[in-house]
Image: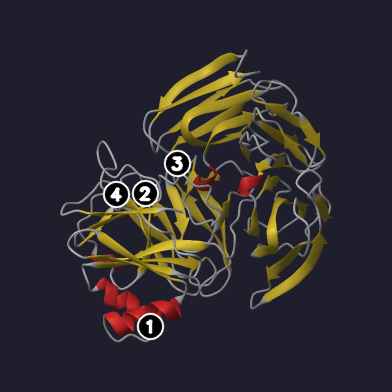
Amino acid sequence: MAYKVKRTTSPQNKSLKKGNLAIGNEKGDYGTTSTSGFVTGVVPSTGGHILVVEDGTTPNFYSFANDSELINYYNIVYSSVATLQDVIIAVAGNNSQVLISSIPVSSSVDVGTNFSGSGHSSNSTTANKLYRLKNNYSDNKTKSGLTEWVAVEGVSGVNYCAIYPGTKIYEIRNDGTYTQLVSSTSSPQVGTINVGAGRRYVGTKPVHFMDQASQHVMVPLSYKGYQWGFYYNRYDPQTVYVYGTEDNTTVKFWKDSVVTGTIIQDFTIDKGDIYTFSDSYAGSYYHLVADKPIVASSAGSGDKMILPQASTGYSYRRYNEHERTLDGTGPSFNGTYVIQDPEGAWAISIADGDGGDSESSVPLEYLTDTYCFGAGPLRSYFIVAPYASTAVTCSYWNGSSWTQYNSHSLSGTLTSPAIHSEGGQNGSTNLVDGTTRPWKWEGNNPYYIVINDGSADEEALFGWNRDEGILSFSI
């Protein structure tokens, strides 16, 4: 995850300004026409810090592997400090300094979220604290679970699961204003929120969102991409939802093949727009291709899901059913639980015997080591492990502590992943009881996981890596 720093006397687009320092997070258009003058910073290792000091000419960068190194340095060079919080407060009061930290997602350090940084010359609400700068222009496939989710429909009662104490949940509107929906949690927590179409939702620590029985409603923006697949064979008609992450995005909806097929839809959307279209598409393979990143989902009266991205690498799935490449053929590698093709391939599985739903494949680069769930009682789960010596522990919150439900040892390879099936995969029976509670899966390697929710509807989960750092700024 990159960041950029520039010495300037005026605010810059999509950045925060402190003193003569403008700071931007990840990829971004930090001016109206160019990024001239910005310097890409050295990214701190997880648990480490970069102190940026503006000396009147150019920003200077000082790197520290951990809290102790930073505290010792600050004590010697600047002022007396004893803790990381002391350093944060000291830096916040010095207009020539910015602290950039990579805090583990499960840390007890309170990392807030800055939602509207564009052109700010100051922001008093961020003083004395670490904040993540949001600009929606990430060019990395983040696995932290901390980028926004978007609602493609307005729905009452969307489920959330927050397993880390101190989590807050916010709704962000397209004009940058925001509302706190969930106050700081004191323990692992599930609940519901009302969402609006095109609005974004973010937790200050990893949060999973799912609308029980309507898995298409909430889509993680970290899963944005350029090429997507679409197929169904029942519940006709279906509606496709496309959300734009950048202005002037051209999207084409192809039937059969992007080489020799037919363009059914051809449209342009801007950042924050949701474009929907609906028709009878049953029984044919379709592809969404965009020139800038989008996210996409689909829904009929059943078979509601986040659509699968087409990947040139390995993609993982629960069942072998419907798979295609962008050029309309079967994947050159069509293994059990995994597909791959250099032209870009995706897969969808439909109907596991109960409920009325389907699920998508997920590319290797989006798999993570930690997931959570809280959309009704858990009915089943299915793990696909593409790495050797993978250990996964499943636990649920009993109201006062975590109870281990099961642990699994799996040893797979990229082309022959190991699997574990827990519970009836048709989702007809609760694993524990009928209580909606936090569930979590923690592994030592990334893996793919499909669950059946409280309505016996299936969906692949999106999670985070526990040891991945949150890049944060003290301003």
Q: CA distance from mark 4 to mark 3?
A: 35 Å
Marks 2 and 4: in contact by CB < 8 Å?
no
Pick whichever of labels 3 and 2 is earlier in the sequence. Answer: 2
Q: Describe residue 325's horizontal placement relative to residue 138 as left or right.
A: right
Could you say whether the residue bearing mark 2 is in a helix, strand or loop? loop
Tell me the crowding category of disc 1: few under 14, some 14 to 19, or many 20 or more residues within 10 angstroms, Cα based.
some
Mark 2 burial class by Cα count in 10 Å: few <14, some 14-19, many 20+: many
Labels 3, 1: front one: 1
Nearer-N-terminus badge (3/1):
1
The residue that mark 4 highlights is 38
Amino acid, disc 4: Phe
Residue at point 66%, 45% (across, down):
364
Of the residues shown, which amino acid type is indicated by label 1?
A: Asn
Disc 2: which residue? 135
Give the label, 3 or 2, closer to the camera. Answer: 2
Q: Residues within 10 Å of mark 3 (few under 14, many from 20)?
A: some
State the SS at label 1: helix
Residue drawn at x 63%, y 23% as measured from the top left: 286
Identity, as a three-letter code, of the amino acid under mark 3: Ala
Closer to the chain start, of discs 1 and 2, is: 1
* Disc 3 element: loop
Q: Looking at the picture, how far across and down is residue 35, in whole percent?
A: 29, 43
